[in-house]
Amino acid sequence: MTEWMHKEGWTLVFNEEFEGPELDQTKFSPYGLSHWKTLEEAEATYQFRNSCIVLQLPDEHQRVSAIVTGMRDGLHRYGDDLGLNHHDRAFMNLVTKYGYFEVRAKVAKGSGLNSAWWMIGFENEKEQNAEIDIFEMLGKDTHLLNTTLHALRDTKLKYAHIPYRTDVDLSEDFHVYGFEWDESGMKFYLDHELYWEIDQSPDYPMVTLLQINDGDGGWIGELDRSIPYPKEFLVDYLRVYKREGMPMELIPLEGTEGNLARYALSGVGNDITWGDLYNAQSHICYINDGDPNTALISKPGEALPHYIYLDWMQPHIFDTITLTTRAGLNQGPTQWDIEVSLDGMNDWCKVGESGLVEWGNREDEAETFEVKLDQVQQAKSVRLVIRAFNGEKVTGAYLIQDIAVYLDSKR
């Protein structure tokens, strides 16, 4: 067992020691950014060796192996043309802000390889999507530790980067990498020595990824084909410490009062209209944000039915669901079913339907339609199955301004 950090005022709140023999999926998922690819393409290759997880590229066909502590549909869309491959149930194993995070790892050597420890915003608002690359270790130069803040849509931050040159080859042995983050800024450590400090700080929860990937050219370097497979990145542990007063709670907070949709994580089974990376026209988080001025916009030409999901971490009881749209005569959903799942993944059961909805407004006015249900008991997920909408069915789109879920007696 590697020695624990002893730092006055800090308490260990999360740790994964990677003892094996299986990946603890209450802490990490092996599917990386799963919704942008098929599950088969997204699944990491790894093994356990000497109390470490060994992330591997097994052959020339697998370009990335990544594990992650939290995920939701649409998280970290990294290309304008990228579309969702499928819906995955959201999970929040470690989704938190602030603390001292520490990894002990041995990085891969060889041009075209990248070993990375990074964090991304959980996007409970679409602007909360900054990326912190605590390290990206390019195998072409394993004396150079690259640490970067990518602001992306977060206008409160700006890009910052340090190429920190070390005296040692970081691929030859294990080293301890530390990341300290609070409301005043961020500090980065190598073997407990501070090498960079900045006064910028994302003020929202983030998820953690550990990853090896390769490429061929550009920043990552020409792929060195003489290096045998599997190519490996070894991680001994991830540990997270907090000072008193730092938030540990996940978002959204669990609750049983008022609009239960506000406590859910939203997702979709079919793609939506995103816009470009920095000026997203719609976003999944909009459908349960309680704001009728934000909208999810369907992707034109995507075959019906469409699936809109709300995932809770704990089961809920409800009997009323509302859908809000604008200019419903032009772009409102007109028919949808309501289905629930007790575990959030299987055995979807229809519990209600809208019937044919006749919206009253053609102008930009919001309208809400309510569906009453027999009381649903202890469901972890609800989904709306959109079967028809107003507008041209090939090039047109519908808008959902908001979805709300209530237990009527508690409204």
Image: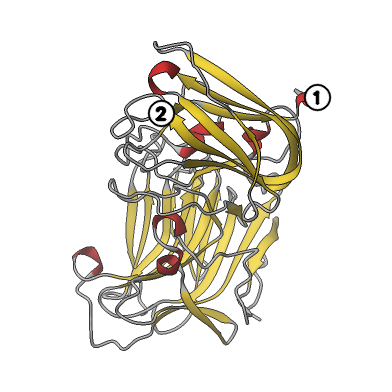
Whether residue 254 is situated above or below residue 79 in the rendered picture: above
Secondary structure beneath label 1: helix
Q: How is the image coloured?
A: secondary structure
Left or right: residue 26 versus residue 227 is: right
162 horizontally vs 86: left or right: left
Q: Secondary structure at mark 2?
A: loop
- Quadrant where the N terminus sits is bottom right
Q: Residue at x 28, y 87 (%)?
A: 227
Q: Above or below — where is 221 with respect to 264?
A: below
Q: CA distance from mark 2 to mark 1?
A: 31 Å
* Residue 242 in sight in this render: yes
On the image, numbered disc 1 is attached to which residue?
A: 409
**The quadrant where residue 254 appears:** top right
Q: Nearer the viewer, mark 2 or mark 1?
A: 2
Q: Amino acid at mark 1?
A: Ser
Q: Residue furthest front?
A: 356
- Mark sitting on residue 398: 2
Front position in the image: 44 or 395? 395
